[in-house]
Structure formats: C-alpha cells, structure tokens
Amino acid sequence: MTNNQLRLLWIVLAVSVWVFLSAAMGHLGVTIAFPKSIGSWKNFTEQGSGRPSTRECSCNNSPGNTYAAIEPNSLQSTPDTKVRMFILANMRTGSSFVGDIFGSSSDVFYLFEPGLSLNEALENLEDRPRVLSGVYLRMLRRLYLCDFRQLDFYLQWLSQKDMFNLRKLAPRLHDLCSKSPAKGSCTITREMATESCQQSKYLVVKSIRIPDIMLLMPMMEDEAIKLKVVHLVRDPRPMIASRVIALTRTRVTWLSDSIREFLCLYCKSNWENMVLGTQNPRIKDRYMFLRYEDAALDPVAAARRMHQFLGHSRVPESVLKWIDVNTKSAKPGRPLYSTARNSSKAYRAWRDGFPFDTAKAIEGTGQCAGMMARMGYIPLVDEKHLRNSSLSLLTSIPSGNDDKNYDWMWDL
C-alpha cells in the first residue's frame, strides 16, 4: 500500500470516529465544556491542623477564564415577551437570600439550583466532571424556553420532595401542588410545569454551579432569550469563614492549600466576570452587579434595583412582606442554610471571632487584593479595625475604566 493510500485510510478512520462520537453525544443532548482546572472547584475539606500553607495559587499564571466558552446548541427558540434572569453566584455569598426575594413573588417562575437534580441523575457517569457544565447549560436553555420534554429526570426529582422543600426549590410549582387534595407530596407533570412556566412573564434561576459568565454569553446574546444576569459577590473574608463552617462544621483558623486554591479562583473569576459584564457592549445592558453586603444592609433597596433590572415596575407587596419577616429574625438555633435572619447584623457577624492573620492572608491570596479594591471592600489595618464593627469594611464601588474606544475588541 502506498503512502498516499495509507494517509487516505487514516483520514477516513478519523472522520468516522469523529462522526460516531458526535452522533453519540448529540443523542445524549451533551455539549462538552472542558475545564482548565476542574478539580479546583471541588468542595474543599482540608481544614486540619498545622502551619498555614504558603504555596502560591496555581491559577495566578493561568490564562483566560476558568472554563472554555460553549457554543450555542441546536435547541431553537423564537423571541417572546418573557424576561429571563440568572443569579450568578458562589456558595455562601447570599444567593439563597437573593433568590428567595424573587421566589416570594407570585408572577416570577423561580427555580432554586436545578443543577442539583442533574448531579444526581449523572451520579454514576464516569466522565461526569467533563460533561456536567455543558449538559447543565442545555438544561438551563430548555428551562428558560419552558421546554420540559427532555427534563423528566428533573420533574421526577422535584416530585420526590416534600412540600416544604418543594416550596424552596420551585415555589410556583409548589403553589399548584398546594391546590391538590393530595397531602405531603405532589407528582409534577410536564403539562403542569409547562403551563406554570408559560403563564409567568418572569423566569429566574439561581445557581452556584456556573462560575464563569462566559458560559452564559450565548444566552445573553441570543435575541430569543436575552438572558439577564445578576452577578452576586461577597467579601472573600466572610465568604471563606462561612464556607468552611458549612463544609467542615469547624471555624477557619488558617488557610490550607485547598482553601487558597479556591480563593484564588473565586477572586480571579469574579473580577473577570465583573470586567466582562460591565465593559462588553453586547451584554452590559443585561448585566447587574450586586454585593451581598448591600443587599443585607438594605434589602428593600436591593429588591427595588433587581426588580427594575428585571423590568418590573415596582416591588410586589408579597416581596416586601417576605423581606420584613425574614430580615428581622433573631431566633436562636437558626439552621445553617436558613435565609431568615437579622440581615443588617448577620453580614458583619464574622468579625467577632475571625483570626486577624487569616483575614490578612485572604487579602493577600492570588488576585483578592485587586478584586476587593475594584468592588469596594476595604482592607484591614489591624485587629482593632477588624473587631470594631462600627467601622465599615465597605466603600462605594469605584467607577470602572469602560473606554468605548476599545469596544471594537469585543467583536474580534
């Protein structure tokens, strides 16, 4: 066999394999997104004991965003009058609190962490970490189009929840189920979900499973979806304090390697998300930046901003009532993930016992100092500064360098 014949044979074999894999993944409805550092986003549990780590963040020198951009999939849509919103956040940044503000409005079809169902459905898939974000984005697109035809796993997952949890996960579906004579649980059908979704003008999803706004850009730029994004951020110092307690049930005393790695990604990705959201002319009208601390200090003002961004003419009475009930709570023994609390006090409670050296270490990790300065978080001077809660660690958010002379670069 000649060299040319061998070369042709190899080309035919390669194309055949590519076609087979493309067909297989298309049948599964999978769009693959390959993370550059997927392990770094795992929940960390290395609290342990010993000396603090001094290892540099490996992501300091990594180029670009954490995840590769995902191309729009083939699910077709046509423009309509619905307003779609995504709450982009990380764990322990107040996203449940902000999400519940929308969940308390009867004209908002709100969904809490639908990706939880996907994690369970793909639990035994060997390559789950490498396909999960792509599949989740396709799931989100279907949800925003009220298309539940391939989401039976999600509806079955919701149907297994008791009424208390269903109210948190999907309040409008809970409202439908509460009208049913059945007690304790409810079977949610495609027809129920589709009708409830289609009757709602506003569709809002809250999720901590998308770390990079680049992954949402296809839906933000799609004129049929026009996705709006509320980018919720929290001061990395109390975020870490809360996250370690949530994951390990212990207080943070020093920064382990895994905590530093997560911090590095948290500060870098949120800074990049803010720059992209505020400067890209194609999406900046569909982007809103919100600090958790501002929402905790004045939840009514935050609700007003978010509803105006959503396109709502006013904050519904049901939302104002929810805020009044759930931001003045001082009950002891409050569950870890409860959103009922005295919000104006809760946001600064971390300062009472948090080690000063650890707080300064957080400020000096990766790009956290730059991220904090850009978002209006004040660095600590000394331990007295940390303990004196009358001294705010917030300042106004500096205006960015949105130079329109460089708008052309976003079209490259």
Image (tube, helix red, strand yellow):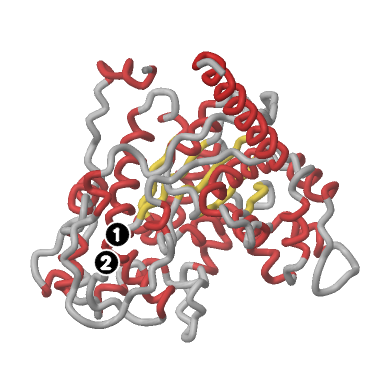
On the image, the x and y values in percent for residue 7 come to 52, 19
Residue 204, placed above or below residue 216: below
Q: Residue furthest left?
A: 382
Mark on residue 261?
A: 1
Looking at the rendered structure, the kind of residue marked 1 is Glu
Question: Do the CB atoms of the residues marked 2 and 1 lie less than 8 Å apart?
Answer: yes
Q: How crowded is the residue under tag 1: few (<14 C-alpha within 10 Å), some, or many (20+)?
A: many
Q: Is residue 368 above or below residue 313?
A: below
User: Up-down: is 198 above or below 373?
Assistant: above
In the displayed image of the protein, which residue is found farthest to the front?
Answer: 1
* Circle number at residue 257: 2
Residue at mark 2 to residue at mark 1: CA–CA distance: 6 Å
Q: Residue at x 68, y 52 (%)?
A: 106
Kind of residue indicated by mark 2: Asp
Number of numbered tags placed on the structure image: 2
In the rendered image, residue 356, in percent from the top left (x then y), is placed at 16, 73
Q: Position of residue 86 (x, y in %)?
A: 53, 44
- On screen, residue 294 versus residue 335, left or right, reads left
Q: Nearer the viewer, residue 44 or 396?
A: 44
For numbered disc 1, what is the local secondary structure? helix
Q: Quadrant of the N terminus?
A: top right
Work out which residue is located at the far right of the displayed protein and give it: 181
Q: Which residue occupies 46% across, 54% down?
A: 300
Q: Is residue 372 visible?
A: yes
Front in this rendered view, residue 95 or 212: 212
Horizontal and vertical percent position of residue 118? 64, 55
Considering depth in this image, is 187 or 69 the residue closer to the camera?
69
**Secondary structure state at the residue bearing disc 2:** helix
